[in-house]
Image (cartoon, rainbow, N blue to C red):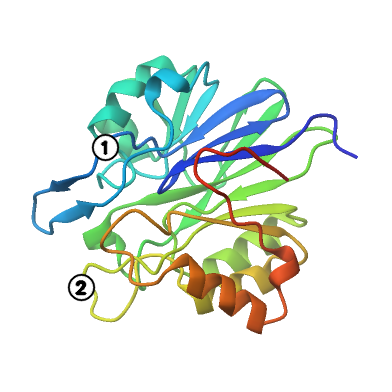
Amino acid sequence: MTQNPLTLTLVGGPTVVLEYAGLRLLTDPTFDAPRIYEGGIALHKLTGPALGPAEMGAIDAVLLSHDQHPDNLDEAGRAFLPRAGVVLSTPEAQERIEGVTGLAPWQTQRVGEVSITAVPALHGPEGAEALSGTVTGFVLSAPGERVVYVSGDNASVAVVSAIAERIGRIDVAVLFAGAANVGRFGDADLTLNARTAVEAARELGEALIVPVHAEGWHHFSETRERLVREFGYAGLAGRLRVPEAGVPLAL
């Protein structure tokens, strides 16, 4: 039995508020309105956030999977970072952004009673780091609480399997899905697709699965509806919890 409620509120894309063990945690802050981000590969944001920075309230920690792509940290998200008590991300993000604490894989930081452990993530096929950069996921644990895994932009089922083997029981998994693909690696996706999300769910035992980062951007090559069908066809519909933007989801 948990000591505290566990609630997730989807802001949009990869951005969620997690109320966990008495803390309020924010993942990958993205608060910009719809726009185009120019660059080597243009990214098209299609929908704005369900909640803005002014509606966030106090945030004890930001869990930033990576800082190098605007669909995970946009301009308004960067402006928000100093408001958080702690910002945890990759060692590379620490070098680029003042105030960020970088965690290497398997390194743990305590925030209140919560242990936040950085875990591996692979943003594309093997060797993707050279182009996509380093990404991290996070595992949250606290005495008497459920264990929560936040995948970050990870496309590798093998990485999920290794995390599950090392961590042990995972009760809730927030999986970044949507089959993100900008053509950089041909048909190889940058995040989990519906099929690989099902495979990841099987590696995670009986964990509840919450898909996020699966809507609101042009470069998502699959819909959440397809993911829901895939889980249904696989007999895993009972483990899926699909959040509605702006509506707290009790887990």
Which residue sits at x=78%, y=43%? 146
Which residue sits at x=47%, y=70%? 156
Q: Say which element carries label 1.
A: loop
Q: Which mark is residue 146?
A: none
Relative to 121, 208 lies left or right: right
Relative to 229, 97 lies left or right: left
Q: Reading the chain from its start, which is encountered first: label 2 or label 1?
A: 1
Instruction: Tell me residue 22's x, y (percent).
Output: 71, 23
Tell me the residue that label 1 is attached to: 74
The answer to which of 9 and 39 lies nearer the viewer is 9
Rendered position, 85 above or below 157: above
- Which kind of residue does numbered mark 2 sit on? Gly
Rendered position, 140 above or below 114: below
Which residue sits at x=32%, y=41%? 48
Rendered position, 30 above or below 36: above
Residue 220 sits in quarter: bottom left
The answer to which of 19 and 246 lies nearer the viewer is 246
Mark-to-mark CA distance, 2 and 1: 21 Å
- Which kind of residue does numbered mark 1 sit on? Asp
Q: Quadrant of the C terminus?
A: top right
**Number of callouts:** 2
Contact between labelled residues 1 and 2, with CB atoms less than 8 Å apart = no
Relative to 10, 203 lies left or right: right
Instruction: Tell me residue 77's x, y (percent).
Output: 32, 30
Q: Quadrant of the N terminus?
A: top right
Q: Say which element carries label 2.
A: loop
Rendered position, 6 above or below 182: above
Instruction: Tell me residue 160's x, y (percent).
Output: 58, 64
Mark 2 crowdedness (10 Å alpha carbons): few <14, some 14-19, many ≥20: few
The answer to which of 51 and 184 lies nearer the viewer is 51
Tell me the residue that label 2 is attached to: 183
Mark 1 crowdedness (10 Å alpha carbons): few <14, some 14-19, many ≥20: many
